Image (cartoon, grey):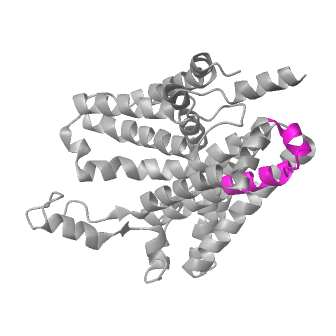
Amino acid sequence: MKSDNAALADERLKPVSAITRLLRRPELGAVAGLVVVVLFFMITADPVMFSAAGLINFMTPAAQLGILALGAALLMIGGEFDLSVGSMVAFAGLVFGAALTVLNLPLGAAVLLTLMVGLALGWVNAQIVLRTGLPSFIVTLAFLFILRGLSLVGLKWATGGSTQMRGIDEAVEGHMFVGMFSGNAFEGAFAWMAREGWIATFASGEPTVTGLPVEIVWFVVLTLVATWVLLRTPAGNWIFAAGGDPKAATNSGVPVKRVKVSLFMLAAACAALVAVITVLSSGSTDARRGFQKEFEAIIAAVIGGCLLTGGYGSAIGAFLGSIIFGIVMIGLTYTNIDQDWYLVFLGGMLLVAVLFNNIIRKRVTGER
């Protein structure tokens, strides 16, 4: 018995090469994909794509998708899915717009109400999944249609028959919190960089990029926070354990149900935040807001290394996967390639990512 234990201990202490450790990182596929995509567009696209203005052009949609992808990634690591987050963006946009234009609430109260509605919807999804034992795929697929339908009905009620709500800009004009969710940050820094010649300027001397869109700031900050939680806190260990083996995790004292409820609520809150950002950026909301974004968010998470079976993945991977989406989505406009190839890219990248995560990685690293 002692010899068996010693052998087991020796196996666990066996040194692992740097290459093997690298191959075991969830982000490896996303890093490789990002390199390939960047090289492709450096060869085929107009060079202006990689100027400061071009970077902002593809990072803005990447950030909006990425906020959704972060919530989706953490939920997938925890062993669940939420296919309703795209429809939740539309419904939360309705709640936010109605709070401003119908209820005439101040911006801060409208944002708080929208986030609370998102958290409540996430809690409902989680309760149905955990109490009935139904797959989260089915439950949230049902809510995908329910919330999209409620958005259509609610917008017609709030606007007197239209599926688009306007008047947002007028409702928030002068509010002190607008800059937290709309517009640009660090405008002074960009003006200074233009004066120093670090970024391009117009003939008038104004910088071609006046600041960093706030959704990018939210995207980066949330990625850093999510990465810290996953890698440096007990909650991160609980998330991996809940997705890897829920029964064993429960037996070890991990509050699996509480973890999963929190993750559903987090994914919904991310959708509500995206709704607030996009509504303020466009000055309106409509029933098609967030259409198919649930699938893009899950694909970005899978490209970033999340396994469909749970228990494996990273926030950094979702971050990189979302950037890949942004580059391809906007990069095609800088080329002569038909933009409908973007849909082919979505399916292809999902297939490649799943193959990499489930076959190639296991064969190379020897994991079971």
In depth, the one of 320 and 48 nearer the eye is 320
In depth, the one of 93 and 17 nearer the eye is 17
Q: Quadrant of residue 26?
A: top right
In depth, the one of 69 and 220 nearer the eye is 220
Q: Say how many tags the image has.
A: 0
Estimate the x, y position of residue 84 in percent, counting from the top left.
68, 46
Q: Is residue 266 magenta?
A: yes
Residue occupying the point 58% across, 49% down: 70
Q: Left or right: 219 with respect to 251?
A: left
* Magenta segment, prevailing SS (helix, strand or loop): helix
Residue extending farthest to the front is 2
The answer to whether residue 82 is seen in the rendering is no
Residue occupying the point 48% across, 34% down: 30
Residue 33 in the image: above or below residue 127: above
Estimate the x, y position of residue 309 in percent, counting from the top left.
72, 31
Residue 228 in the image: above or below residue 20: below
The answer to whether residue 253 is seen in the rendering is yes
Residue occupying the point 14% across, 61% down: 201
Residue 213 in the image: above or below residue 137: below
Quadrant in which the C terminus is drawn: top right
Q: Left or right: 5 with respect to 140?
A: right
Quadrant in which the N terminus is drawn: top right
Q: Left or right: 32 with respect to 189?
A: right
Q: Which residues are magenta?
A: 245-267
Residue extending farthest to the top is 363
Q: Quadrant of residue 76?
A: top right
Residue occupying the point 36% across, 32% down: 35
Q: Is residue 237 magenta?
A: no
